[in-house]
Image: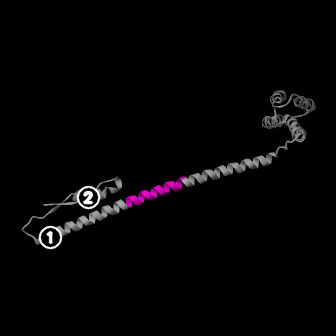
Amino acid sequence: MFGEAQGLYHFVRELRCTPELDLEEAANRWLLPEKARHLKEKFPRSNFQSTSEWAGAVLNEILTVSLPAIPRFAPLESWGKVDNTMEELREMAAETHMAMAIGYAEKVFEEELNLRECLDAMIARQVKNLMQLKAMKQMLRQTSALREDEPPKRIAAARQLAIDAETITKGPGTPRRARIVS
């Protein structure tokens, strides 16, 4: 019974897609021999003016007589319901795709934000180091001016710290600690 219903369903589907199909070939592929013989006898093509008229009559016979005659078989839903269901599935797929794109964009945005925060912290540390360096330099000048017997002291790596502070956004730099050199 299930095989007969499935065969009728596939035959209907094929007839809807290609109404000019060869009835014998399609019937042999999908229908039981007695069903195929019944349709050939009841609906010879010579009785119809057009192929689409013939196909409509065969479809009507299958959907209204043959399928309901099969026990425990629910009639096929109307094609309009099937089309509506397909449209709903397409909309759901589009919504799912959009939700996935938004989720991915949110993840990328979070990573970008974390990276910017990290860079801002690195820049703030370098600016702090630079300010400390300038303060030490100024203090050394003041103490050297008070002691005229000693030569002025220099801070090593001051130039390198200034370069690191300028290039921190270009890549990771490892600032050197300033040391006082006599």
Task: Please say if 54 is above or below 83.
Answer: above
Left or right relative to 22: residue 117: left
Q: Amino acid at mark 2?
A: Leu
Circle 1 is placed at which residue position? 143
Q: Crowding at label 2, few (<14), some or many (≥20) Cα neighbours within 10 Å?
A: many
| Near-viewer residue (56 or 81) | 81
The outermost residue toward the left is: 149
Q: Crowding at label 1, few (<14), some or many (≥20) Cα neighbours within 10 Å?
A: few
Label total for image: 2
Helix, strand or loop for disc 1: helix
Sequence-wise, which precedes: disc 1 or disc 2?
1
Q: Which residues are magenta?
A: 104-120
Task: Please say if 157 is above or below 44.
Answer: below
> In the figure, residue 52 lies in which quadrant?
top right
Q: Residue at x 81, y 36 (%)?
A: 6
The outermost residue toward the bottom is: 146
Q: Residue at x 56, y 54 (%)?
A: 103
Examine the residues drawn in magenta and state their main secondary structure. Answer: helix
Left or right relative to 31: residue 162: left
- How far from the left and from the top, in percent, is residue 32? 85, 30
Give the label on residue 161, or none. Answer: 2
Magenta segment: does it hold 115? yes
| Near-viewer residue (18 or 131) | 131
Left or right relative to 91: residue 167: left
Q: CA distance from mark 1 to mark 2?
A: 23 Å
